Amino acid sequence: MAEQHHPPYRPQHRPHRRPAAEAPDGFAAALRSAVRGEADFGPTARALTTMDASNYRRVPLGVLAPRDADDIAAALTVCQEYGVPVVPRGGGTSIAGQATGTGLVLDLTRHLRSILALDPAARTATVQPGVILDDLRAAAAPHGLTFGPDPSTHSRCTLGGMIGNNSCGAHSVAWGTTADNVRALEVVRYGGEALRLEQGRALGPHGVRELIDAHLALLRTGYPDLPRRISGYALDALLPEHPGGPDPVRAFCGSEGTLAVVTEATVRLVEAPRARALAVLGYADESAAAEAAPGLLPYRPLTVEGMAADLVREPAGLLPRGAAWLFVETGGATPAEARAHAERILRAADAVDAAVVTDPAGQRALWRIREDAAGTSTRMPDGTEAWPGWEDCAVPPARLGPYLRDFRALLAQHGLRGTPYGHFGDGCIHVRIDFDLLTPAGVSRFRRFSEELADLVVAHGGSLSGEHGDGQARAELLPRMYGDELVGLFGRFKDLWDPDGGLNPGVLARPAPLDTNLRFEVLPKRPVDVAFGYPQDGGDFAGAVRRCVGVAKCRTETAPGAGVMCPSYRVTGEEAHSTRGRARLLHEMLAGEVITDGWRSTEVRDALDLCLSCKGCRSDCPVGVDMATYKAEFLHHHYRGRLRPAAHYALGRLPRWLRLARPFAGLLNALARVRPLAGLAKRLTGITPERAIPELATETYSRWLRGRQGKGTHIVSSSRVVQVWADTFTEHLSPQVGRAAVRVLEEATGRTVLPPPSGVCCGLTYVSTGQLDAARAVMRRTLDRIGLLPGHPLVVLEPSCAATLRTDLPELLPDDPRAHELASSVRTLAQYLEEYAPDWTPPRLDRPAVGQTHCHQHAVLGDAAERRLRERMGLTGELSGGCCGLAGNFGFEKGHWEVSVACAEEQLLPAVRGAEPGAEVLADGFSCRTQLDQLAGRRARHLAEVIAEGLEDGRP
């Protein structure tokens, strides 16, 4: 039979799957009349909450952001009346599916974020459920206190979610689980009844005490004794002999939103060590590390974390020799005391090699490897996808070594791969496995493996969940751990709390099968017809969208050091403006159930509108989501054959207009200074009225260079030349940067800078506005004209153009070897000087520096060479991270002014305003310089200009 070829899949602007379920008649109106918070039943809100960080997907009816506890009670009353299920949701980082549901999602992060009280003397805090963990820790820090449990998602997970999942984190060997650190809870049941839970008070709804008293023997013998037993309901906490008496708070923690909704929690705070040290212990393999971990617990460390070499994708200089490592953190009143504690552990450990790290920056670098593991472990070293599902089972710490050996053997038996890491001191292992969840055969293997692994965990005396809860991923298998009788008791306990079954049905009690509701089954089965090559995803746009696993590092609202992602979310706080939110909308666009218009979707367009295309997610997202590329792809299809916004024609085709305007630069500059004419021009071109039009250069960079060489500078040998890219911004808007770079390159290398060929362009502005057919035409013309000299790198002064040549060029022209050759030749000025003039001594300036590391440089090119060059020049201080907010065409487009300014105010403008007198203001990107000029009235300079000035001054 002849092979059949199927056309590529193209999302249509019409429904192509079953429509999503609709809310019952009258429900939306009744809910809105009963609450003050925002109720949204539109496709965007629903699409954003179909998934958490798990393998599962369920489509809700709508989303409510309650303003207070009264709103929650009113919503639960209306939902009971209309028979609508309810799913409480915090940061949405659960990995077992418990933050997804088919009813009303309660978004507890928008309004319920207050720390109501903090009592340093009693070491307690009272918080609302939407409080971010890092916000609570920041509030407690001035008192020398902290909240002990600290999952790797601490920058975005909420206290309500931690209570629901009984979260733990790296410091549980010292401070326990969330259940160990909650003192009292205010909760609301389905139907609106409010209860207070506190040790020594009522055990919960009527009938709970009788249920416990009738099954004392089963509850006393049915639970394994281990520190990370998270699975099921903790009914043993209600036994009369429980220390301190029956504890309904502990029994409620880990109930995954199935019993009631938390409206307020009083939590315990612990003393935070004033100083910390990190003992890093290297072992021959992960089993050796696992077997060593229990022996370190008597030394009372703060953490005993483990990981193997297959998790470390890039060499980390601080890691000692070994194929697996333990991170053992210690604390003390002074740095010396913390170090001494770490050194005692180092001497006691039978390690291949070891080191004690006391430098805070070094510790952060090591912890970053560990904290990003939830994302980095989603890709195997060869790029194969790996998924949660058996992310966090736990065994007694003494059994961890044998368990890991058996676990690896089971993986091999099923032909699977995974990268274990986690809380070795508590016997809890995280792992993502390369399940095939796209085909029936792969899903069948997923089920068989899950059943066999559940039996293996139980055989080692373990818990199916050691941190993240059972959800849909493991709850079906709880009878293997607890037996049918105890699991039946779980169902009866659930019924006493929630007799209508309205709270998070299908999770934990009476769960849905573990191989249903998989989020991949709705995606197209054929490749999507796209413009970019997506080389990291096998050319599959659906595969690229699947990259987002929901760990939500993009939802961090405080600036993570020099990170960039995600500037629009950090300004608006809206899930739709996070990288994860946009990826979810694209996923639902491909699914066609909630977002039904395919590439024509206005929901996706509106969410992407505030994406600055900063590319920060490409580097800062643990799984390398590249929303700038996805946005360009979407705009390409969305506007194909249709009229585009005016700014796309004006700014997206800027190189063309600037070439045409070159002979009239002086006249156009004069006209731009006439306010009515400038206002008219901005209205016609879609430019926001608040922006000033940049001034055009009367002499371009290339014309200056050709004129200069015509006055006596001659090329001696083809081996003594430098190729400098004449990007649009340097050529027409800031030629002084090019002139400075020529001065620096000639001084440093003794080589002659070649005049650039005419008509070359990287295609950046076409790409950023989604004009990808035009971008490819421009790129092909450039490849025809550039004439790269073999063995000669190409110096690119504008970081955004360098990033476009490095990434977008080969991804838009994947079959043209010239594109890959050009991409590999790109160097920044500092990179070129470091490579080709290593012995050159730059001028010593010895002054502080502030400014902006261009977001594209951060994401694509890296700035290590620039940092080293600034250090050699005596330019001290850190440049701002984040994004300047102008971001090429973004900050000029109508409707983006407020977000653009707010992005600049997030890091850049405060840093520049607070700079020391005489500080050098650096910004290699034209956008960054323009933003500083227009918002702060400060002239920033390219590093080339600063070096050239130092050379002119004759500084050594």
Image: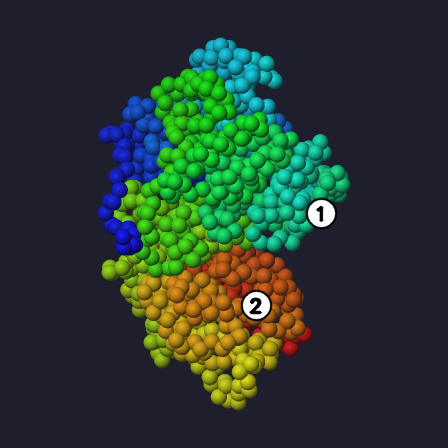
Residue 738, can we see it? no
Mark 1 crowdedness (10 Å alpha carbons): few <14, some 14-19, many ≥20: some
Residue 723: x and y, percent? 50, 76
Q: Residue furthest bottom?
A: 712
Q: Residue at x 50, y 70 (%)?
A: 825
Disc 2 to disc 1, C-alpha distance = 34 Å
Residue type (three-letter) at the residue carrying disc 2: Gln
Where residue 770 sits, quadrant-wise, is bottom left
Where residue 748 sits, quadrant-wise, is bottom right
Q: Quadrant of the C terminus?
A: bottom right
Mark 2 crowdedness (10 Å alpha carbons): few <14, some 14-19, many ≥20: many
Q: As drawn, is 907 to the left or to the right of 918? A: left
Reading the image, the residue beneath label 1 is: 353
Residue 199: x and y, percent? 55, 18
Element type at mark 2:
helix
Q: Nearer the viewer, residue 282 or 798?
A: 282
Q: Residue at x 54, y 43 (%)?
A: 419
Q: Nearer the viewer, residue 126 or 78?
A: 78
Q: Nearer the viewer, residue 350 or 584?
A: 350
Precedes in sequence: disc 2 or disc 1:
1
Q: Residue at x 42, y 64 (%)?
A: 810
Q: Nearer the viewer, mark 2 or mark 1?
A: 1
Reading the image, the residue beneath label 2 is: 831
Mark 2 and 1 residues: CB-CB less than 8 Å, in contact?
no
Residue type (three-letter) at the residue carrying disc 1: Asp
Residue 220, can we see it? yes
Where residue 422 sits, quadrant-wise, is top right
Q: Residue at x 47, y 81 (%)?
A: 755
943 shown above or below 347: below
